[in-house]
Image: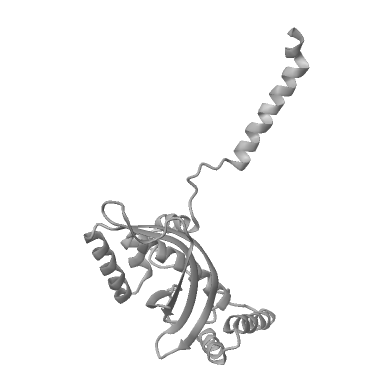
């Protein structure tokens, strides 16, 4: 028994403790309180005063040389083909927007739009007016806020979890006299349950993933120095 704690054994134990400590420093641990992408986005925005009002949709770098210009043009054409999914009107609209705004990229726009969708539906469910006000055009915000007020007046609460976006596609794209407008159809998977003031379930299912479909239009003036887009119209698909 006395030999169990001999010097070589103690050295091995000490080294194991050091290794475990260093791994914990590098990898960290999961606590169950990790932040979602939407939460991290809001925290980043809060740390940057003056930049928290809208979601930036990752503008495409403007090429500097002729070679860069040709490469970016090929990339743009490939993205337009990919996201227009054979719709000539959508392709023409995306091309017109890109000509008016050299920094526009369909791929980057879609990445930003998907992040915005998650933030907006999550904020709407929780009644986060500040996030909604920052992301929505005024008329759209007023409509969302009315629903939130009615829900609060009735004492109802929504339990909501965003699961994912299995299908997202551009349905319309156009450049009018003032704005670039892109309409997107979002097919989302969520878990949603609405409860009354006594906690009784009145709508949805807290234990089941359901599908929802929305068509949203984002707009931006391509001549504006502000690179951000705002949600200007919404409709729910059948």
- Judging depth in this view, the residue of 61 and 25 nearest the camera is 25
Residue 119 locus on image (x, y percent): 43, 63
Which residue is painted at 65% across and 37% down in the image? 23
Residue 210 locus on image (x, y percent): 47, 65
Please say if 226 is above or below 70. above
- Judging depth in this view, the residue of 221 and 87 nearest the camera is 87
Q: Is residue 72 left or right of residue 101?
A: right
> Residue 73 sits in which quadrant?
bottom right
- Residue found at the very far left of the displayed protein: 153
Please say if 9 is above or below 40. above
Which residue is painted at 48% across and 74% down in the image? 186
Q: Quadrant of the N terminus?
A: top right
> Residue 103 sits in which quadrant?
bottom right
Residue 139 locus on image (x, y percent): 29, 76
Please say if 118 is above or below 223. above
- Residue found at the very far top of the displayed protein: 2
Total of numbered circles in the picture? 0
- Judging depth in this view, the residue of 13 and 194 nearest the camera is 194
Residue 3 locus on image (x, y percent): 77, 10
Which residue is painted at 46% across and 63% down in the image? 190
Q: Quadrant of the C terminus?
A: bottom left
């Amino acid at each position: 028994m006395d030999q169990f704690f001999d010097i070589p054994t103690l050295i091995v134990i000490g080294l194991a403790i050091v290794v475990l400590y260093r791994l914990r420093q590098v990898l960290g641990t999961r606590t169950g309180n990790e932040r979602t992408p939407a939460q991290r986005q809001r925290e980043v925005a809060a740390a940057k005063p003056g930049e928290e009002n809208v979601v930036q949709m990752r503008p495409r770098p403007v090429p500097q040389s002729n070679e860069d210009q040709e490469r970016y043009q090929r990339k743009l054409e490939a993205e337009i083909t990919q996201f227009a999914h054979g719709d000539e009107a959508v392709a023409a609209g995306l091309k017109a927007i890109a000509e008016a705004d050299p920094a526009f990229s369909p791929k980057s726009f879609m990445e930003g739009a998907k992040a915005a969708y998650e933030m907006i539906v999550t904020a709407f469910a929780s009644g986060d007016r500040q996030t909604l006000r920052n992301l929505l055009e005024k008329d759209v915000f007023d409509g969302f806020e009315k629903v939130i007020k009615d829900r609060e007046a009735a004492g109802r609460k929504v339990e909501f979890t965003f699961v994912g976006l299995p299908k997202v596609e551009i349905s319309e794209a156009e450049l009018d006299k003032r704005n670039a407008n892109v309409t997107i159809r979002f097919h989302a998977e969520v878990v949603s349950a609405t409860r009354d003031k006594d906690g009784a379930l009145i709508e949805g299912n807290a234990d089941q993933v359901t599908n929802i479909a929305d068509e949203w239009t984002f707009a931006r003036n391509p001549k504006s120095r502000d690179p951000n887009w705002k949600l200007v119209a919404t409709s729910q698909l059948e």
